[in-house]
Image (tube, grey):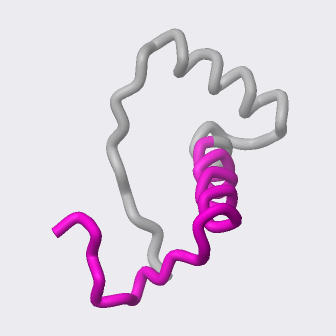
Amino acid sequence: MDEARFSLRIHPVIMEKMKYIAKNNGRSLNREIEQILKWVVDDYERKCGRIDINSKHDPFI
């Protein structure tokens, strides 16, 4: 699967702290943010059930 691109506006202080954390974890900033997002999705799915991205149901319509 091709990776999606997404622009993110973030406070400069948070950005610098995220760079620090990423470096400390041996990841690029992009991979660190991706890992955090994965943890959020995993946590949500544990609590609420698996998200079917192929479903015709779109809760945002």
Q: Specify start and end residues of the magenta stretch as a single range.
A: 33-61
The one nearer the camera, 55 or 2, is 55
Q: Residue furthest front?
A: 48
Q: In the depicted view, which residue is nearer to us: 33 or 59?
A: 59
Question: Left or right of 46: which side holds 5?
Answer: left
Image quadrant in which you'd find residue 19: top right
Say which of 42 and 37 sits in front.
42
Viewport quadrant of the C terminus: bottom left
Residue at 27% across, 76% down: 58
26 on left or right of 35: right
Q: Is 37 above or below relative to 45?
A: above
Image location of residue 2, percent across then percent down = 45, 77
Residue 53 highlighted magenta (yes or no): yes
| Quarter occupied by residue 59 | bottom left
Residue name at image x 63 percent, y 25 percent: 18
| Residue at 29 percent of width and 83 percent of height | 57
Q: Nearer the viewer, residue 14 or 28?
A: 14
Question: Does 15 lie within the magenta span?
Answer: no
